[in-house]
Amino acid sequence: MDTSSHVIVMLVVGYLLGSIPFARLFTMRSGIDLFEVGTGNPGAANVFRKIDKRIGAAVFLADGLKGALPVFIANMMGRLKIFG
């Protein structure tokens, strides 16, 4: 794969992983709308405070992996000399 293909794959994977709403997915069974409780922010802190501490911790970890996984994938694809 050439450099431009690597960049496109990294951008698409990063975008797709970033668009997964883990807080919403993890709290679907509770029947509580995250936009209606607490701060209204569908994030780990709101889940932790208003729904369940264990689910909030899971959302926190999933959101962290959502940021780290694209970096790991890009690193596994090899170090690219994009800017130099």
Image (tube, rainbow, N blue to C red):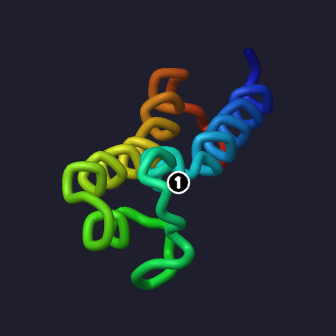
Residue 77 picture location, percent across and down = 54, 22
Q: Quickly name the residue at label 1.
A: 24
Quarter of the image with the N terminus in it: top right
The residue lying furthest to the left in this view is 53
| Residue at figure coordinates x 53%, y 54% from the top left | 24
Horizontal arrangement in the rendering, residue 73 relative to residue 19 (left or right)? left
The residue lying furthest to the top in this view is 1
Tell me, yes or no, if residue 61 can be seen here.
yes
Residue 52 picture location, percent across and down = 25, 58
Q: Residues within 10 Å of mark 1 (few under 14, many from 20)?
A: some
Amino acid type at circle 1 is Arg
| Residue at figure coordinates x 35%, y 64% from the top left | 47
Residue 53 picture quarter: bottom left
Residue 39 picture location, percent across and down = 44, 84
Residue 61 picture location, percent across and down = 30, 47
Compare residues 2 and 22 and report the one nearer the observer.
22
Horizontal arrangement in the rendering, residue 79 relative to residue 3 (left or right)? left
Compare residues 6 and 57 and report the one nearer the observer.
57
Tell me, yes or no, if residue 84 can be seen here.
no
